[in-house]
């Protein structure tokens, strides 16, 4: 987890707690991410797609871990948050490519919509394990 005055970032699943990515890794780590607004403050949540195949899986796991009221509206692809101070502000995909220190943001969430590239890249740059990665928008 990374917290700043501008927001917070949470890695879920097997990425939770990673402090560095090995440059010897030749395979990218493909993830999904969602952005929540908690009383207006952005919160970025990401996890590997093989553990979180739907953006809603990220929302459900995060809400459960933080005791935020939420429920499945249409399983497996839509979770609704019932806390009036927390809203979902979009999502997308990211590819972590340790072998060349690149991170690519792309796509959108079918259930929750697109994302703001400047906002997400600013948040992800606060993660120590990804601080020296170049961040680009991939179409």
Image (cartoon, helix red, strand yellow):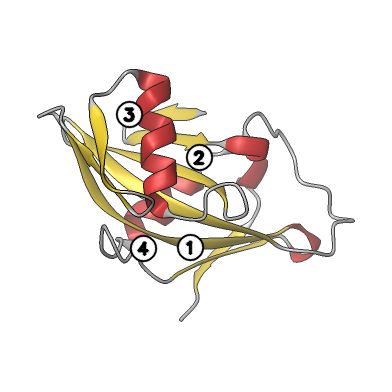
Identify residue for label 3: 5
Residue at (16%, 30%) from the top-left corner? 39
Extreme residue toward the top, this view: 67
Residue at (75%, 57%) from the top-left corner? 98
Number of the front mark, 3 or 1: 1
- In this view of the protein, can residue 56 be seen by the observer? yes
Comparing 110 with 97, the one in front is 110
Which label is found at residue 117? 4
Q: Are marks 4 and 1 in contact (CB under 8 Å)?
A: no
Comparing 31 with 1, the one in front is 31
Identify residue for label 2: 126
Mark 4, secondary structure of its residue:
helix
Q: CA distance from mark 3 to mark 1?
A: 24 Å
Indicate left or right for 75 with 69 as reference. Answer: right
Which label is found at residue 93? 1
Residue at (38%, 24%) from the top-left corner? 64
Mark 2, secondary structure of its residue:
loop
Extreme residue toward the bottom, this view: 139
Q: Earlier in the sequence, mark 3 or mark 4?
A: 3
Q: Are marks 3 and 1 in contact (CB under 8 Å)?
A: no
Residue at (30%, 61%) from the top-left corner? 116
Q: Are marks 3 and 2 in contact (CB under 8 Å)?
A: no
């Amino acid at each position: 987890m990374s917290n700043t005055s501008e927001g917070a970032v949470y890695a879920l699943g097997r990425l939770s707690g990673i402090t560095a990515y090995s440059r010897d890794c030749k395979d990218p780590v493909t993830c999904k991410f969602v952005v929540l607004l908690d009383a207006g403050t952005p919160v970025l949540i990401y996890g590997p797609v093989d553990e979180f195949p739907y953006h809603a899986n990220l929302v459900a796991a995060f809400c459960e871990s933080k005791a935020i009221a939420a429920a499945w509206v249409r399983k497996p692809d839509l979770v609704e948050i019932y806390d009036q101070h927390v809203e979902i502000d979009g999502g997308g995909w990211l590819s972590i490519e340790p072998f060349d220190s690149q991170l690519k943001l792309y796509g959108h969430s079918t259930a929750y919509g697109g994302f703001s590239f400047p906002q997400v890249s600013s948040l992800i740059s606060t993660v120590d394990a990804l601080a020296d990665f170049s961040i680009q928008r991939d179409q």
